[in-house]
Image: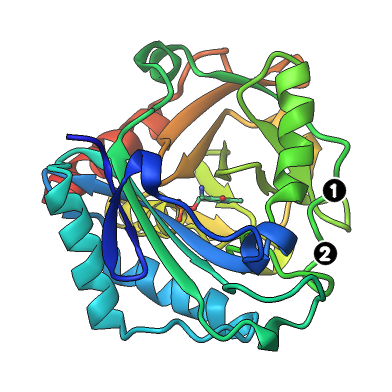
Amino acid sequence: MSLQIYIDGKFYDKENAKISVFDHGVLYGDGVFEGLRSYNGKVFRLEQHIDRLWDSAKSIALDIPMSKAEMIDAINQTTAINNIKEGYIRVIITRGVGDLGLDPFVCVHPQVIIIAAQLALYPKELYEKGLDIVTASTMRTPPAALNPRIKSLNYLNNIMAKVEASRAGCEEALILNHKGEVAECTGDNIFIVRNGELLTPPIDAGILEGITRNAVLELAKKSGIVAKEIAFTRHDVYVAEECFLTGSGAELIPVVSIDKRIIGNGKPGTVTKKLLDAFHEETKR
Ligand code: PMP
């Protein structure tokens, strides 16, 4: 059976899952989304993703045309109908059909789309070897322009940085904020270990408040690792003992070099491994 895509309350075969070219999601990237993971048929931290989706929508003045409970039900139906146990789920809310003008309020019917698919993860070797990354020259969108806390359908800022990563032969790129501080990567949050302490940029550095990031901060505290949300620069990453990225798709992935500076001993570090093990345990619970 072809993959079943949820659109606006109904399921469609992948080939027939279509939306209007007049949807402002298509015309302007006007909408919000979430990327979730399911482990053994259960979505990891589902309520937190739903809350973040609702917050993103509220911030762009978009009313999601269902309740949180109905959304949870629709997500569970989509994973069940596609028989997804270990999978990745994308929830998209577009502004809906309007005209060619910008006015979002002519769009009266937001579209809810849910795609549940098998995972396309980073290859296993990369978790053992670690990633080589570069700093992008593209700066993260300043929060006063469009807050990166909004997980909006307009990901061009991230894509511009991803272009730089790919052209440099890397999977990811570090993006700095408007103050030149470390913000995050194109689709992942960043952590470093310095003097045995775990550091990650604070939310007001202009980042997405990652659900994996928050889980790692909790797990660090439980494991007796000092964890701080604190602003730092690229220099701190260069001289860090360890570095790793977090995201729903990536989980925790080690970074072993940035801008051709080797981090630590050039291998995934012990704090990273400890936290990755703790994270795997957490996803099994
Ligand atoms: N930052 C950005 C820009 C992202 O798109 C994502 C999600 N892929 C993350 C961080 C990680 O967030 P989460 O752990 O909630 O998946």
Q: In the rendered image, which residue does mark 1 sit on?
A: 139
Asked whether, in this view, residue 131 is left or right of residue 154, the answer is: left
Is residue 149 visible to us here? no
Q: Secondary structure at mark 2?
A: loop
Do the residues under discs 2 and 1 have CB atoms within 8 angstroms? yes
Q: From the viewer's perspective, is 43 left or right of 271?
A: left
Q: Is residue 132 above or below residue 50?
A: above
Describe residue 69's horizontal placement relative to residue 6 as left or right.
Answer: left
The percent position of residue 128, horizontal first and vertical second, equals 39, 14
Q: Quadrant of the N terminus?
A: top left
Callout 1: CB less than 8 Å from ligand 1: no
Q: Position of residue 193 (x, y in %)?
A: 55, 38
Image quadrant assignment for residue 105: bottom right
**Residue 123: x, y in percent?**
40, 17
Label 1 crowd bin: few (<14), some (14–19), many (20+), radius 10 Å: many
Residue type pointed to by label 1: Met
The reply to whether residue 174 is visible in this rendering is: yes
* Number of callouts: 2
User: What is the image's colouring?
Assistant: rainbow
Question: Could you tell me the amino acid type at mark 2?
Answer: Pro
The picture places residue 237, in percent across and down from the top left corner, at 70, 35
Closer to the camera, 40 or 12?
Answer: 12
Q: Which mark is residue 181?
A: none
Q: Is residue 113 left or right of residue 86?
A: right
Q: Which residue is labeled 2 in the image?
A: 142
Q: Is residue 194 above or below residue 10?
A: above
* In-front residue for pair 118/49: 118
> In what element is the residue under mark 1?
loop
At 49% from the left and 27% from the top, the residue drawn is 254
